Amino acid sequence: MPSVIKLLPLSVAFFGAISVHANSVNEIEQLINKWLSIENQTSQLESHWLERKSSMSQNLVILEAEQQQLKALTERRKKNSTELTKKREQLITQQAQLELDQQQLEDQLNTISQRLLSLQVQLPPPLLNSWHNVGDLTDPQLSSTEKLQMALKMLTLLTEFQQRISIHEMAIEHPDGQDIWVKQLYLGAAQAWFVSEDLTYVGTGFASELGWQWEFDPSIDAQQVAQGIAMQQKQRPADWLTLPILSYKSATQSEVNE
């Protein structure tokens, strides 16, 4: 019996040691499994992070490119806005100048129109008829351009008439009331002579404060007037004539070389 009593404690100790060893192995295995799991998770996290990092890097590059484009677009818009502001200011300045020029033109046109209208009454009849054919400066429907063109046309007609000797025919009322058909010799727009076909009636035409005036004057040599008209119409050679010249205020005798 004593030997049996001695063996029992040894077995218990042996099996206890095995049990403790087995528990340690299990713990180690569990730790290893946990470590492997952690490593696997770490690897997955690293792989996922690398993927995210690559994606984020690409997105960052795209965002930076977009930022540069937006910056360039903003600069262009700012530049365009500045240029547009300058152009707008220039246009406003030009518009103000144009409006001022337009007003000055209107004032000048009104002044010219008034002078032309006051001058009409002193024009010789042929020239006055030509002006009437151009138009009416008092027409309120006329634009500034139309009025300017009309004024220029009238001034051109006046200049042309003033610079030439011209022949016209018309009826002139005699002081006794009858109308006498006469030929007229105009020296510019301020002086004229007339004579009837039979040389019975002769006289002068001139501008005055009362307007254009016809004056019968039997003291004038009707033959001289008729010769002047004939020379102007190329019906006889040029020669010296003696005709009265009437100024705006007084009459004087002078020779006219045809």
Image (cartoon, rainbow, N blue to C red):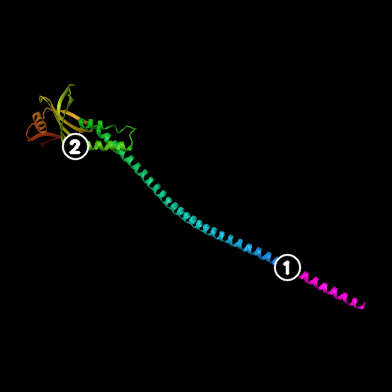
In the rendered image, residue 252 lying in the magenta stretch gets the answer: no
* Residue 91 locus on image (x, y percent): 39, 47
Q: Amino acid at mark 1?
A: Glu
Q: Which residue is mark 1?
A: 29
User: Which numbered disc, 1 or 2, marks the residue that appears first in the sequence?
Assistant: 1
Q: Which residue is mark 2?
A: 162
**Is residue 65 at least partly visible in the picture?**
yes
Q: Quadrant of residue 114?
A: top left
From the viewer's side, name the closer residue of 25 and 223: 25
From the viewer's side, name the closer residue of 18 and 68: 18
Classify mark 1: helix, strand or loop. helix
| Mark seen at residue 1 | none
Q: Quadrant of residue 21?
A: bottom right
Where the C terminus falls, by quadrant? top left
Q: Residue at x 73, y 69 (%)?
A: 28
* Residue 206 locus on image (x, y percent): 18, 32
From the viewer's side, name the closer residue of 88 and 4: 4
Q: Residue at x 33, y 36 (%)?
A: 143
Where the N terminus falls, by quadrant? bottom right
Q: Quadrant of residue 187?
A: top left
* Residue 184 locus on image (x, y percent): 15, 30
Magenta stretch, main secondary structure class: helix
Classify mark 2: helix, strand or loop. helix
Q: CA distance from mark 1 to mark 2?
A: 132 Å
